[in-house]
Image (tube, rainbow, N blue to C red):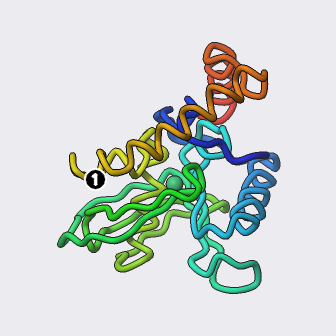
Amino acid sequence: MKIVNYPHPTLRHKSKPLRRVDAELRETVRQMFALMYEHRGVGLAANQVDLPVRLFVVNLEAEPGKGEEMVFLNPVINRPKGQVEMEEGCLSLPGLYARVRRPERVHLTAFNLAGEQFEAELEGMFARVAQHELDHLDGVVFTDRLSEAGKLEVRPGLEDFEDEFRARRERGEIPADEEIRKRLAELEKRYC
Ligand code: ZN
């Protein structure tokens, strides 16, 4: 398992709800936490590891054995309250940071790996991370949420990622769009 960087097509995939959880998916979740810690992240969405399912993981402490490991399946966010600007980064856009305006508090419902539904009122950092990760499941990256001025500012950084992606594809390290689409469709058939 690897983290895919912008502009990998899976980051633009709008994922369908999960309908089954099996041993392989539980193992996927375990590997996602390990990868997230390795990169010192606080959240990681399935799209970022090239998987088309509505699932993300969070540990606000970014370290194993510290904080709480939380798994969100088929998450839904609503009842946004307030607006606040905070700096965000993303493991799929390493080194790029920008201030993003989002609701300050949100209501979240999701399922855990045991198939139990839970809900929570989120605020602060937790609300921020959950909204950022849920965006990934809809094919949205945080730079899409910037103002026109903000988008201009990150443009050179995004172009560097685009150049690197092209070069890696030319070296045969990244499959063609068609091949990626086929793989995602097969996984969707299995889980969604
Ligand atoms: Zn991200």
- Left or right, 139 with respect to 62, comes to left
Q: Amino acid at mark 1?
A: Gly
- Pick the quarter of the image with the C terminus: top right
- Look at 55% across and 54% down and name the residue there: 73
- What is the number of callouts on the image? 1
- Look at 33% across and 64% down and name the residue there: 99
- Look at 59% across and 36% down and name the residue there: 52
Figure check: 149 above or below 169: below
Residue 138 percent across, percent down from the top left: 43, 41
Depth check: 139 or 56 in front?
Answer: 139
Quick one: which residue is furthest to the left in this view?
A: 82
Residue 93 percent across, percent down from the top left: 55, 50
- Left or right, 52 with respect to 96, comes to right
- Secondary structure of the residue carrying tag 1 is helix
Residue 18 percent across, percent down from the top left: 57, 42
Figure check: 122 above or below 77: below
Depth check: 86 or 21 in front?
Answer: 86
Depth check: 94 or 58 in front?
Answer: 94
Q: Residues within 10 Å of mark 1 (few under 14, many from 20)?
A: some
Q: Is mark 1 within 8 Å of ligand 1?
A: no
Residue 63 percent across, percent down from the top left: 71, 79
- Look at 50% across and 50% down and name the residue there: 74
Quick one: which residue is furthest to the top in this view?
A: 178
Q: Which residue is mark 1?
A: 150
Figure check: 169 above or below 15: above
Answer with the quarter of the image where residue 82 lies. Answer: bottom left
Figure check: 22 above or below 127: above
